[in-house]
Image: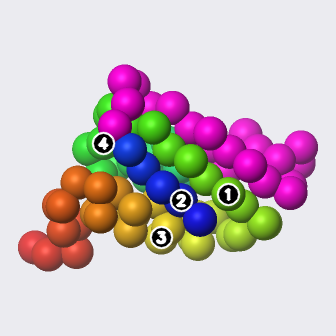
């Protein structure tokens, strides 16, 4: 689950059952996805149970669309 709210800079709060092994990668995927969407200031709360990178990207994108109102799927 990913929720996004206002913040200064990108702050990622992660709870994951695989944080010891993949926490750095999960944070990188979240940050890269948001930067790719033009989001530079946000507080992100992510709860993960071992999702693949593509799933994390999709969840972050959906949360960003809901938080900003910007539809990234339209041309």
Q: Position of residue 60 (x, y in %)?
A: 46, 60
Q: Is residue 12 something one can see in this rendering?
A: yes
N-term-proximal mark, 2 vs 3: 2
Magenta segment, which residues?
6-28
Does residue 17 sit above or below 5 in this rendering?
below
What residue does disc 4 label? Answer: 39
N-term-proximal mark, 3 vs 4: 4
Mark 2, Cα crowd under 10 Å, few <14 / some 14-19 / many 20+, is some
- 3D distance between C-alphas at marks 2 and 1: 7 Å
N-term-proximal mark, 1 vs 4: 4
> Is the C-beta separation of discs 1 and 4 under 8 Å?
no
Magenta stretch: includes residue 66: no
**Disc 2 element:** strand
Colour mode? Answer: rainbow
> Is the C-beta separation of discs 2 and 1 under 8 Å?
yes
Q: Position of residue 73 (x, y in %)?
A: 22, 74
What residue does disc 1 label? Answer: 47
């Amino acid at each position: 689950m990913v929720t996004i709210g206002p913040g200064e800079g990108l702050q990622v709060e992660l709870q994951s059952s695989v944080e010891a092994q993949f926490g750095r990668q999960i944070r990188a995927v979240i940050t890269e996805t948001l930067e790719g969407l033009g989001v530079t200031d946000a507080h992100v709360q992510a709860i993960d149970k071992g999702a693949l990178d593509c799933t994390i990207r999709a969840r972050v994108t959906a949360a960003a669309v809901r938080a900003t109102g910007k539809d990234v799927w339209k041309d």
